Image (cartoon, rainbow, N blue to C red):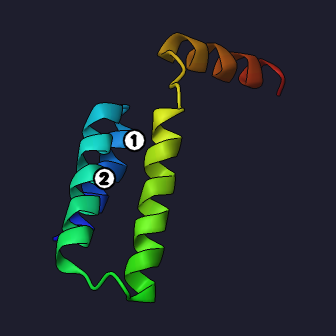
Amino acid sequence: NLKLKILNARLGLLGRQIQSAKTDLASVADDVRKYSDPTSKQAQSLQSALSLVQTQLSNTSIPALDSSFAALTLAAAGK
């Protein structure tokens, strides 16, 4: 179930649905806190990684599609 939620968050990022990805990652973090052993190294590592990703998502700004298309056009013109 956690793998599916993480995959859903990845798909949300690919689809530029940042809020959906944040919600999915928050749900995963809650489940890890509820159902894992807090002294386990694996659980601690996962919680650390999740908090890092959530922090990075908060600080991320997605460029507008127009900017992306302009960059692609510029790159294609250079070939």
Q: Nearer the viewer, residue 17 or 56?
A: 56
Residue 14: mark in rendering? 1
Q: Residue at x 28, y 85 (%)?
A: 37
Q: Split into 4 quadrants, where in the image is the N terminus? A: bottom left
Instruction: Give the image location of residue 5, x and y in percent.
Output: 22, 59
Asked whether residue 17 is in view, the answer is: no
Residue sitting nearer the eye, 24 or 26:
26
Return the residue at label 2: 25
Q: Nearer the viewer, mark 1 or mark 2?
A: 2
In front here: 60 or 79? 60
Q: Residues within 10 Å of mark 2 (few under 14, many from 20)?
A: many
Q: Quadrant of residue 47?
A: bottom left
Q: Position of residue 43 (x, y in %)?
A: 37, 80
Q: Residue furthest front?
A: 39
- Left or right, 47 with reference to 37: right
Label tally: 2
Name the amino acid type tagged 2. Leu
Residue 52 shown left or right of residue 17 in the figure: right
- Place of residue 75 in the rendered image (x, y in percent of width and height, measured from the top left): 75, 24
Quick check: marks 1 and 2 in contact, CB under 8 Å? no
Question: Where's residue 46, x and y in %?
Answer: 42, 72
